[in-house]
Amino acid sequence: MRRILLLLPLVLLLLALVPLFRQASPVPSAGQSPARVTQVDTAHYPNVTLYVGVTGKDGRPVGGLSAGDFSVTEDGQPVKIDDFAGGAGPVSTVLVIDRSGSMDQNDKLAGAQAAARAFVEQMRPGDQTELITFNQRTSIDERFTGSQDDLLRAIDDIDADGGTALYDSMVAGVDALKSASGRRALLLLTDGQDCRGSTICPAVYGSRRSLDQAITYAEQQGQAVYVIGLGERGGGERDGIDESVLRRIADATSGEYFYAPDGDQLADLYRKLSAGIQQEYMLTYRSPRPFYDGTRRDIRVSVGGAPAAAGGYVERHLIDVRSDPRVGLLLLLPIVGALVAPALLRRRSASGEQPPTPVSLDSAPDIAPALGSTIVQPPSVLVIAADVARCTSCDAPLLRAGARFCAECGAAQPAPQIEPLRRIFCDQCGHPMGDRARFCSHCGASTPAPIGTFERSNV
Amino acid sequence: MNKTIQIYYTAVLGALGGLLGWWVVGSVATGAWNVWLAYALIGLGLGLGIGGCVAATDGALIKRSPGRALRDGLAGGAAGALAGLAGLLLAEIGFLSIGGGLLGRTLGWMALGGLLGLSDLLVSRRLNRALYGALGGLAGGLMGGALYEGLTQLFLAQSDRAQVVVGGIGLMLLGACIGALIPLARQAFSRGELRVLNGEQAGLVREVSDTATIGRYDGCDLYLPDAAVAWRHALVRRTSQGFAVEVLPQSQAGVTVGQRRLAPGEAAPLRGGERIWLGETAVEFVGRR
């Protein structure tokens, strides 16, 4: 318990400090900003690439803007846009499609397939798409490819059957995009709820990972998720999509949520999404604080003076190790000082006062060389004559001083008498002396007898 | 030398280790490297510096034997380098998983400190001692990481040169915290300790976590430069029944425990407050609950 108490103040102190150092969270989403930061790429830090989508009042992507229309700040400092492109460049997309049994109803699967086909048909040279489908299991139907034929063939082969492991499929999509470079997009389509923790379908048909785990993983990888809910709105014990869950995934990952009541509207939605991603602007700037310090940076992007859109990133380095010999020498000085300080202090105190003599153990035991079991002479030592307490009833020695009961006969023992401390004074000058001092610290006179009660005894 | 001074010296040498690690590794331009490769090297350098300096404290400042300091420093440095390599990669994973900030940095440095404390297992091969060291290293990493993050926040907007100084001071503080808390944890968690009452090492306190060797050999845990003490004289061992002292066969003179004389090869249980005589040196055993 004492040890825990030793560490407790330290832990409490650190917990108290946590709020002081907590990073400021990014500003809430810019509600009416026409711009939207869809991805922050720090693969070439301190060069930072932003993907920014701009939509007009009609909700359509706005094209034809130039670098001069954008203004960017990082942690409040304006930055110069070094590289600008009116288009997101090659896009890596993962289409995650629900193929649970319920997708067979109301032509939902046919609608999802049509939507995926529409997306694939809009792919440009250089774009790569991967197809992942899921029921209770997640499978990669087509790995990243630029071949539209291969993708269309894989889309046609999708069959609906089984449960819904939505969260696992999201993790699989994030995993697939982890090593992709450039603009990365994850489109997740479902018509139901994950069977994990659901009363609608058996839990074994659900995900192994929880919703929180899936969201945390996507956040760690900086992957936004576009979530598309298809069909009836449900939730709780009602079948159909649980919009609160789908919105939470989109919001937590800085993605977007879309709702489609039936499969017919899906193709149009996927086309719009594809066009929006392809028409995003790519802005590259050098961080005004190009340090490897592992801190969060908040970004604001505004277009033509309109309210700014928020984004941000965390610099990836736990520590920046760059040394300088002059700084090293400077930092060495306090260490050298700390090493010699105790010796200097000891020397100073030694020159000021006669050091107290330690307990009189200077007469060492006279131990004769022992060979085998032959012990020739018992050692003679100077020991502090501890008065061995004895039982008041049977006179047996007590196990320890102050024992309340005798270990031999069990008789209760009187409470130990505590002797008041004796004050000792120098015979020559009357100055008070330490308990075991052999010389007066004031006049230097030696005391004739050692302080304390010592006797020579054979052990 | 009392325990406070011993811990103080370990902290100062830990700071020196952090500084040396920063100095050497920082002279390599790892900023342009792949983060994982860079962190493997940085962890190796920091572990070598902090582990080596902390391990050498005993020989350099307590036993005052340069040869022992060098041997311990090399062994501790090698174990520390391995622990540092694994620890910093683990630290970076934790840091990135949490998304940086105070929590990410402190948890990351805790991983490094904990592994540095545990690395003693490779050198001493004593499980309890290594586990207590790991706990101390975790606490040291927590404290050092919090201090480092505090410095980072304080000098966030400063110049490039200020960032270099902050990095050096941060690693010195980290080394000092790990260096101080590893022996402090061993002291706090071990159930017994030996205190030298007279002679050249009077005042020296050495905890007994699993076993502690006593002798004139400077590799012993309790080094007694007393001509009447054998090279390896006695061993204090923690058993399930408590602590016991065992006279090693090399010892010709035996040991006197309280009022009992022990011949070579004999052992006797130890009680708190009991005195052990080896040659002309008296050592008090202090048992704690």
Image (cartoon, coloured by chain):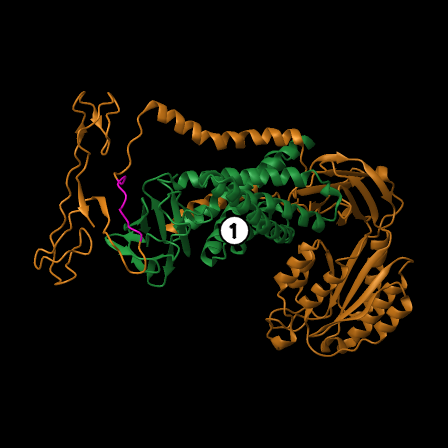
Q: Nearer the viewer, residue A416 or B126?
A: B126
The answer to which quarter of the image holds residue B46 is top right
Q: Residues within 10 Å of mark 1 (few under 14, many from 20)?
A: many
Asked whether residue A363 is drawn in magenta, I would say: yes
The residue that appears at 61% across and 77% down in the rendered structure is: A202
Return the residue found at the far left.
Answer: A393
Quick check: A360 above or below A148?
A: above
Q: Chain of mark 1?
A: B
Q: In this picture, which residue range is highlighted in magenta?
A: A361-369
Q: Which residue in the structure is indicated by mark 1? A: B117
The answer to which quarter of the image holds residue B90 is bottom right
The residue that appears at 32% across and 25% down in the rendered structure is: A353
Which chain wears orange?
Answer: A
- What amino acid is labelled 1 in the image? Gly
Give left or right: position of B194 versus B13.
left
Quick check: B117 above or below A265?
A: above
The residue that appears at 68% across and 71% down in the rendered structure is: A165
Indicate the position of residue B22 as horizontal and vertical percent values.
63, 39
Q: Nearer the viewer, residue A80 or A107?
A: A80
Give left or right: position of A53 versus A241.
right
Indicate the position of residue A260 as horizontal and vertical percent values.
76, 65
Quick check: A36 above or below A209?
A: above
